[in-house]
Image (cartoon, rainbow, N blue to C red):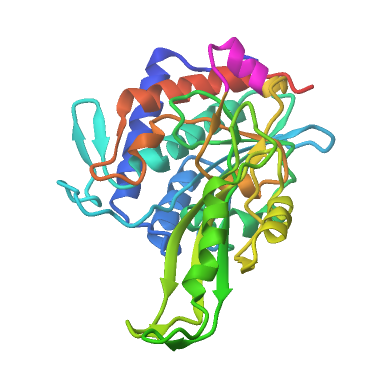
């Protein structure tokens, strides 16, 4: 596929991308409050000549030349951010460029991937492609909200494969762990702590807490390792002299691609005595086959597939997907978050080479 990506054009695309990202940083977009960033994103896409559609705080465009019967590729990244943590030495909502670095909340997670994917989409849209292409800037990713990607997928052409622009150092993450949060309740019987009466719910909970600490699920993924369960919050008791009759605790479950969350929940309920309720089972682990043509194309360009422990909107996609973007996941959700300008430049170039040479099976 022939594309126009001269050094001069790449520099122009990078400068545009940095300007767009700077504007997004300057418009606070904490999850569920992304309207200003969505307005800015929509306006930029319209000025770029794209046929933009919008639902809530989600903006998307379908590349020209859409044809039934061809596979559809979805390019996705999110516009929302977490709340800024304590410890920022800069104003998180003021984009600051120092040398090659652009500082600001959301610059790394995942503003770099958001703007680089958009620029690659614009380059590839002008070329003859053997596939359809959709670009989606989605909302509420950081809270897995129902007003984000899940709400707009029914309005898009159904994707056959997707690239999610999370920070991976431009290496293809071909699997990522899922998430399930459990609320667990152990029951006892209240009594006076000075007398030998009642049933202490804390003691009733201890064997189950220990089970979550020590249990090993049988299926171990070569990419993601074991399923991980962690007790993270415990509540019990009302005062020092009352034996507590309930003890509740929260469990963070990180699934691998060899289990569905429903399978894990079933095994857990069979092994603990306490009552177990899952807040949701919809955020399953995701993966794409190592021999998928898109992964093979990444490898041909020097990519090294790996498994990612962090969750993204991949969990809600109805198709195989890989996570691939500029930046470093270790910078996400940290004080003084930044993205490298050269990281954005290299991402635009890599996405363009990747998609220009991809031949769907």
Front in this rendered view, residue 298 or 348: 298
> Viewed as shown, does residue 287 lie left or right of 58?
right
x and y percentages locating residue 235 in the rendered image = 43, 72
Where's the C terminus, which quadrant?
top right
Q: Magenta stretch?
A: 295-305
Front in this rendered view, residue 214 or 297: 214
Q: Is residue 17 visible?
A: yes
x and y percentages locating residue 26 in the rendered image = 28, 51
> Viewed as shown, does residue 22 lie left or right of 197?
left
Name the quadrant containing residue 327. top left
Could you tell me which residue is drawn at 73 percent across and 29 percent down? 131
Front in this rendered view, residue 143 or 203: 203
x and y percentages locating residue 215 in the rendered image = 60, 46
Could you tell me which residue is drawn at 66 percent across and 16 percent down? 296
Asked if residue 307 lies in the magenta stretch, the reply is no
Could you tell me which residue is drawn at 33 percent across and 57 percent down? 83
Could you tell me which residue is drawn at 57 percent across and 60 percent down? 208
Compared with 26, 344 (above or below) is above
Furthest toward the front, the residue is 196
């Amino acid at each position: 596929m022939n594309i126009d990506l001269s050094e001069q054009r790449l520099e122009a695309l990078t400068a545009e991308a940095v300007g767009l990202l700077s504007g997004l940083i300057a418009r606070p977009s904490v999850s569920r409050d992304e309207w200003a960033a969505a307005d800015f994103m929509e306006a930029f896409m319209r000025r770029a000549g794209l046929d933009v559609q919008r639902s809530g705080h989600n903006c998307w465009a379908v590349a020209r030349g859409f044809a039934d019967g061809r596979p559809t590729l979805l390019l996705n990244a999110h516009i929302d951010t977490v709340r800024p943590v304590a410890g920022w030495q800069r104003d998180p909502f003021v984009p600051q460029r120092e040398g090659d670095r652009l500082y600001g909340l959301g610059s790394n997670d995942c503003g770099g991937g958001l703007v680089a994917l958009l620029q690659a989409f614009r380059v590839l849209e002008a070329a003859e492609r053997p596939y359809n292409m959709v670009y989606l800037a989605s909302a509420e990713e950081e809270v897995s909200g129902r007003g984000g990607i899940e709400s707009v997928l029914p309005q898009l052409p159904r994707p056959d494969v997707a690239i999610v622009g999370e920070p991976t150092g431009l290496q293809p993450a071909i699997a990522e762990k899922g998430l399930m949060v459990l609320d667990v309740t152990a029951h006892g019987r209240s009594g006076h702590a000075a007398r030998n009466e009642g049933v202490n719910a804390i003691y009733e909970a201890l064997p189950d807490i220990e089970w979550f600490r020590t249990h090993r699920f049988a299926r171990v993924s070569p990419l993601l390792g074991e399923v991980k369960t962690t007790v993270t919050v415990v509540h019990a008791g009302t005062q020092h002299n009352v034996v507590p009759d309930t003890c509740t605790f929260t469990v963070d479950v990180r699934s691998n691609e060899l289990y569905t969350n429903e399978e894990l929940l079933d095994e857990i309920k069979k092994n603990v005595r306490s009552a177990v309720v899952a807040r949701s089972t919809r955020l399953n682990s995701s993966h794409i086959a190592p021999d998928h043509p898109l992964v093979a194309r990444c490898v041909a360009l020097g990519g090294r597939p790996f498994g990612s422990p962090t969750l993204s909107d991949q969990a809600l996609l109805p198709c195989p997907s890989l996570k691939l973007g500029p930046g470093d996941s270790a910078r996400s959700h940290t004080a003084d978050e930044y993205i490298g300008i050269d990281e954005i430049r290299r991402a635009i170039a890599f996405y363009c080479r990747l998609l220009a040479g991809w031949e769907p099976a």
